[in-house]
Image: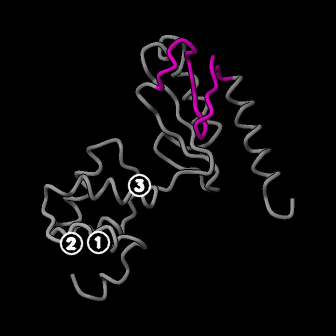
Amino acid sequence: MSQGSEKIQAPGLDSILQRHPRAGRDSLIPILQEVQEARGYLSRDSIVGIGAHLKLPASKIYGVATFYNQFRFQPLGKYHVQVCRGTACHVKGSAKVLDTLARELRIAPGQTSRDGLFSLEVVACIGACGLAPVISINGEFFAGATPEKVRKIIKAYRGKAVENEPGA
């Protein structure tokens, strides 16, 4: 990789990589975690920069990162929606809740809406089984979620976003 391409690295990546001066392949996951913690997601530039630092092809870095569902490749939306798909939530209808959210937001799990307002994530268990099915938006829990309830919740968050716009 040429010196010029190293200059286009994602902001903040250099400081993370400097903490791992002689890193090898065994440092890949901790570095990926640090980058995501700092930036919120793994950008293409970050993956290329990590690959250059570890002397590994970007395709290998990407392959490892896509294997683990903890890594994201898009920034989170202003409102990060998590849908619990644990056993209790599944039994009580979280699949319909997830389908409704995906349709309402026009995104699939793991994606962020074009306007940057919403991101959607499926989680194995939120830990609120007695309140199933449960969704969380930026850490605020909504119990007994149904397709009708989540439509109203999303409408309320869209309204909140409009109210918070400059000049509104």
**What kind of colouring is applied to the model shown?**
one colour
Give the structural element (helix, strand or loop) at label 1: helix
Which residue is nearer to you in this view: 83 or 108? 83
Q: Do tag 1 and tag 2 residues touch (Cβ < 8 Å)?
A: yes
Q: Between marks 1 and 2, how big is the CA–CA gap?
A: 6 Å
- Residue holding disc 3: 37
- Residue holding disc 1: 49
Quarter of the picture holding the C terminus = bottom right
Neighbour tally class for label 3: few under 14, some 14-19, many 20 plus, Cα within 10 Å? few
Neighbour tally class for label 1: few under 14, some 14-19, many 20 plus, Cα within 10 Å? many
Q: Residue furthest bottom?
A: 4
Q: Do tag 3 and tag 2 residues touch (Cβ < 8 Å)?
A: no
Q: Is residue 54 above or below residue 158?
A: below
Amino acid under label 2? His
Q: Image quadrant of residue 46?
A: bottom left
Answer with left or right where residue 34 lies relative to residue 159. left
Residue at (65, 37) in percent of width and height = 104
